Every structure is written in structure tokens, then in C-alpha cells.
Image (cartoon, rainbow, N blue to C red):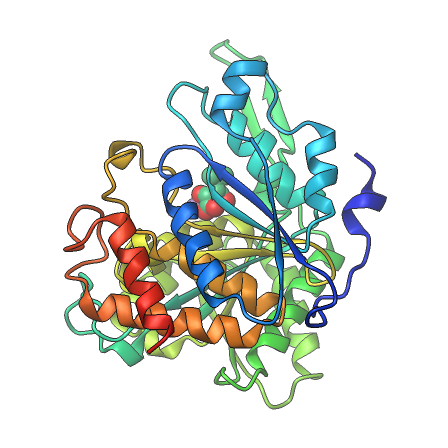
Amino acid sequence: MSAAVATEARPRRLGRGERPIRIGVIPGDGTGPEVVEEALKVLEAVREGFDVQLERLDLGAERYLRTGETLPDEELVRLAGCDAILLGAVGDPRVPPGVLERDLLLRIRFELDQYVNLRPIVRYPGVRTMIPHHADSDVDMVVVRENSEGLYTGGGGFHRKGTPQEVAVQESINPRHGVERLVWYAFDLAMRPDRRRKLTLVHKTNVLTFAGDLYRRVVDEMAMAFPEVETDYVHVDAACLYLIEDPARFDVIVTDNMFGDILTDLGAVIQGGMGIAAGGNINPHGVSMFEPIGGTAPSETGKHTINPLAAIGALLLLLEELGLDAAAERVDRGIRFAVSKMSSMRAGQMGFDTAEVGALVIEGTTT
Ligand code: IPM
Ligand code: MN
């Protein structure tokens, strides 16, 4: 597919009532369809002053097993024509590991140039987590994870594969331009009214002396353009420790693709679990895609036990990105209401089934 389609600029904030908002929906695999269904019910409940046109895409394991296709070009073109995308989850034990991840999920992220993976780590009031000493207010940060480069580009290869002398090389690609636009996004985010104007770079500069050095220099240079933002640096291993010991020190974290992937699973733990962790793959000038970050949960599939709040949180991020603030605010209220009634964020332990949690959110949007 041509980069021209993927990077075609579009206004990020939509005018109200001008035309329906086109949302690409990829329910995907495992529990993806169940949680997406609840998010769409919530969308219908909070939709006021704008119309929505859903573009449902049949992508994921079933399609791959049926036709051998992961992401045909015409589907990518359809996605590129949407205002935003809501994704359930992809991955299936019947498909070799890496196929759907690389050729579907990562391909969308790369082709639509969604260079920021935005992962808020927020603990809603009343959520119980595994860390008893955290207060709700201690856990309120956003991870700005690089989303199209680093170790994820697939650069590298084998030498003498299958022999005792085999060498596997996996390259981390860090273009200055990519680091700059990421770090700019993070500084800009730190300046938004709901943030605390603190930016922490997380990397491993003591070992990754090339990539880490580039990130460090870019942050230091850009800091001059954002004098109100306090900057900090933490090695990634220490960042894991601080997420547990002192999460309140973090406001906006900016980090590379792989570190961000790992850190945000730990981040989900201090939010209350994968059941509530949502993220956005953002192209600030293009089409962004929103997803619960927990994956397909094969052991819960079809049991009506999965927590839909992460998918509903993904919807919230989608509405915010499109500037539909009133609807977003209602979804936020709905999530808070649901959380206050649930006994846990974990699948099967919520005190409600999947659809009942969705209904609680809808009830809460009107209170
Ligand atoms: C995530 C996932 C993906 C990633 C996988 C499925 C490729 O773990 O969104 O965090 O590593 O980015
Ligand atoms: Mn991950």
C-alpha cells in the first residue's frame, strides 16, 4: 500500500454534525468480539450530537485460517479512510505465533504511522490492586511508548541458521526524526491542563549507549522549548521498581517501543489488572486505533466472564482523540460508576458478567 494513503492528513478534531464519524471496528479474536460489543453499546448510549458509521472488518485468525489473508490492501485502504479504529484483540493458538501480531496488528500501526502508543495508567477510585500501599491518587500517569520503530521493525536476521555457529541479530532502529516527534508529543502532553508538567524519560542509557544517548539528547534539547516541564531520567529496571514503590513520581513517561511494551504490563497491574488497561495507537495527524491492551484471553473466550472496561476505556480514548469531549466525559463517568459496584477487575471475579458490566457503565453515563 502506498504511504500516500496512510499518511494523508486529516483534521484531528471533527466538527459536530457535519457528517457521520466513521469508526473502523475490528472485533478480532478470542474475547475481542465480546468486549468490543459492549464498547459499541456504550458508544450508542453516549452518542449525542453526532452520527456514527461503523465499518466492521473481518480480520484476525478466522479470516486467516479461512483464506490465508492477514491484512489485504483493500482492508488497509478502508481503515485509512476511517476517522478512528476500535480493535478488540488479535492472536489465536491455531495460528503460528507472530503471524497475526506482525502482519495484522503491527502492520496497521506501521502503515497508518501510528507512532505513539498512548497508555494511561490510572487507578480508578475503589479499584483493588495487588499493591496494598498505593492510594488511588498515587497511580495517575501516561506512558508515551514509541510505536513504530526500535526493536519492532523486524530488522536483523540469522547467520548459519540451524548450525551450532548460529547467530541471530535483532536490530533496534531509532531514527532521530522518529525520536523527535515522539518526544515532542510527550512534552506537549505534559503541558495539557490535566497533567502535572513532569516528563520522565525511561531508557537504559548505561548499556544502550547509542539509542539511549539519542533519546537523552533529544529530550534535553527539546526541554528548552518547554521550560515549564520538569524533566527526569530513570533507567528501565529502576522504573519497574518505582512503579511499585513510588508511582506518584511519574506523570508522563516517554520510552522506546520494547521498554514501553514491558512497562505497561506492569502498569496494568497497578491499575487493577489487564481488565481495565486501555491504549491508543496514535497518529496525531491521521487515523488512530484504540484497543484494550490485554490480548485475546483464550481461557475466558465465550464464557461472558471477561472484563469489558479496558475496551470501554479504549472507546473513551477514541472519543477524546476525536475531540468528542462530552461523550468521552460520560463514558468516564460510566466507568467510574461500574468500578464502584464491581468486586474485582479480574475476569470471572467481577461480581457481574461481561454484559452486566457494560450495562453498569451505561447506567453510570446518565447519573
Ligand atoms: C501490545 C502487545 C503487542 C506489542 C504484541 C501483540 C505484538 O503486546 O500491544 O502491548 O508487543 O506491542
Ligand atoms: Mn504488550
Seen in the image, is 275 located left or right of residue 58?
A: left
Q: In this rendering, does residue 166 appear at all? A: no
Q: Position of residue 336 (x, y in %)?
A: 31, 72
**Which residue is found at the position 74% from the left and 67% from the top?**
18
Residue 201 versus residue 112 in the image, above or below: below
Q: In this rendering, does residue 104 appear at all? A: yes
**Which residue is found at the position 46% from the left and 76% from the top?**
329
Which residue occupies the foreground of this view, 173 or 22?
A: 22
Which residue occupies the foreground of this view, 100 or 225?
A: 100
Which residue occupies the foreground of this view, 343 or 123?
A: 343
Q: Position of residue 316 (x, y in %)?
A: 48, 64
Residue 260 versus residue 321 in the image, above or below: above
- The quarter in which the C terminus is drawn is bottom left
Residue 57 versus residue 262 in the image, above or below: above
Name of the residue lying farthest toward the top: 163
Residue 185 versus residue 162 in the image, above or below: below
